[in-house]
Image: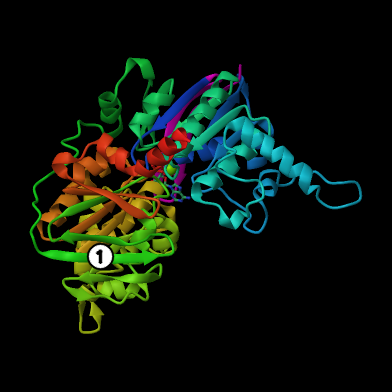
Amino acid sequence: MTELSVIGISKRFAGVRALNDVSLDFPGGAVTALMGENGAGKSTLIKIMSGDYLPDEGEILFDGEPFKLHTPADARQAGIRVIPQEPEIVPHVSVAENVYLGALPRRAGRGLDRAALNRRVRADLERLGFERVISPDTLGSRLTPAQRQIVEILRALTSDAKVIAFDEPTSSLSEHEVEALFTLIRRLREEGLAVVYVSHRLQEIFQLADRIAVLRDGGLVGVRDASETDENEIVRMMVGRDLSAMFARDHSATDKVVLEVDGVTSDDVRDISFNVNAGEVVALAGLVGAGRSELAGALVGDLPIRSGQVRVDGRRVRLRQPSDAVRAGMGYAPEERKAQALLLERSVRDNTSLVVLDRLRRFRFVRRAEERKLVREYVDRLNVRTPNIEHEVRKLSGGNQQKVVLARWLARKPKLLILDEPTRGIDVGAKAEIYHLIDDLARSGVAVLVISSELPEVLGLADRVIVMQNGHITGELDRADASEEAILGLAMAEDLTTSLSEGQE
Ligand SMILES: Nc1ncnc2c1ncn2[C@@H]1O[C@H](COP(=O)(O)OP(=O)(O)OP(=O)(O)O)[C@@H](O)[C@H]1O
Ligand SMILES: [Mg+2]
């Protein structure tokens, strides 16, 4: 059976030691999980295996033989495939063409044989159990993040892979898609592939992995059999200490209403009404696709509101563009942080202080010393791994980029803060710190609205849970009544009703 080994791998970037003398085996027929804090070196190791980066030192063995890996083409030819965090998709061609890019079936003397191609891709999708999730003739530009991942997985599997690496594949998938992906990964393992799996979700790791390798600051801390370890040990290996309490609850909601949403209807949500009070943390729960992010988009002037009203501190806000929301005292960290929110070529300092500059100004000048102090404070609290605050954001690891957007809004302390999936892609230590910061903000009187698909996070953070399905609110739970079962019941309420009534027919 195939075995890929990396031996003594080191990699430096200007000023950063990303990997330091890492040796690790990836046996066929097993899922090896890579874990570690944001910036620990996981993606760098995977990019070395895919030929995207050349190591400064060390070698790679394939089935015991030294293997020259100079370019991504070398890796593909050897059967090493990586599903990246952000797959590259050609926007103006179909899913089917995206999958078979460069190997399209042609009819003699004529162009592309589209019918044959669609049949082939439809068969691939059925084999993998994804036929209901994506259709072969959808245009690349119309794909959701989940569907982009699936295209990339199809590309890998239709090209005789022996080693397949997933870098945080589930962070944008719905529950249904995660199940399909896990079934697929287990099948790949049975077929003898070596699977490499990176995720910050411990639960997933223990469902899926046979072996767990932990990286810290670019070095390998150790490898454990999944059956012989537990979450506590892995967390200790990752962060080098025991974590204190994940959640803090030191705030209590006041009865001063900050946000009033009254019958808001947009293209994607209908008749939404609820309030959030000062000092209160409200969670918006629901399945992926329930309309939570679309609601947030409407509340912050990103998506048009068709009818209904939004009031902040009792005053009606006309939301024509995002700056209207900011002026009314709202802060918003979107789900697609990198695309929607970051200036990648600019520094950590610029990105963090972006929305507090108005407060740091004295006459026309920004008080730089204060700016640096504020940025450093939040960079430290969120443990953003960066050599210094002048470092370009594009050079940070995925999770550290996420933290920068959060630091920006946490530092601003708006009246109302809307956080969409605030801990997606973020390591367990920084997660705890973000929960503590949210609690701090609520204690200082900020109204917080959190969208989260992670139920433990919803239950740990929220004073009140509002559940959505199909674009509208299906129920509301107080902290005392909120449980995973109660939330899921409301999140799937209509599916249950329909399947019941279908059963009676
Ligand atoms: N192209 C690059 N230029 C400069 N520094 C880089 C580059 N790529 C990675 N680094 C640095 O190397 C270190 C390891 O980054 P890597 O992306 O491997 O982390 P990771 O473990 O995947 O983290 P995350 O969980 O946040 O995705 C980080 O300090 C990062 O800033
Ligand atoms: Mg990464």
Q: Residue at x 15, y 50 (%)?
A: 439
Check if residue 158 falls in the magenta segment: no
Ligand 1 quadrant in view: top left
Some atom of ligand 1 lies within 8 Å of the CB belonging to the residue at label 1: no
Is most of the magenta stretch helix, strand or loop?
strand
Q: In which quarter of the image is residue 485?
A: top left
Tell me if residue 71 can be seen: no
Which of the two residues, 88 or 140, is positioned nearer the viewer here? 140
The secondary structure type at the circle numbered 1 is strand
Is the residue 297 above or below the residue 43 in the image? below
Q: Which residue is drawn at 42% across and 49% down?
A: 289
Q: Residue at x 50, y 30 (%)?
A: 196
User: Residue 185: x, y in percent?
Assistant: 52, 28
Which of the two residues, 98 or 400, is positioned nearer the viewer here? 98
Tag 1 residue: 261
In which quadrant is the N terminus drawn? top right
> Looking at the image, which residue sits at the far front?
505
Q: Is 50 on the left or on the right of 176, as rendered?
A: right
Q: Which residue is drawn at 13% across and 61% down?
A: 278
Which of the two residues, 218 or 327, is positioned nearer the viewer here? 327
Is the residue 125 above or below the residue 345 in the image? above
User: Residue 305: x, y in percent?
Assistant: 37, 70
Check if residue 12 falls in the magenta segment: yes
User: Residue 285: x, y in percent?
Assistant: 30, 47
Is the residue 126 above or below the residue 444 in the image? above
Q: In which quarter of the image is residue 297?
A: bottom left
User: What's the magenta region?
Assistant: 1-29
Which of the two residues, 397 or 313, is positioned nearer the viewer here? 313
Q: Is 10 on the left or on the right of 478, as rendered?
A: right
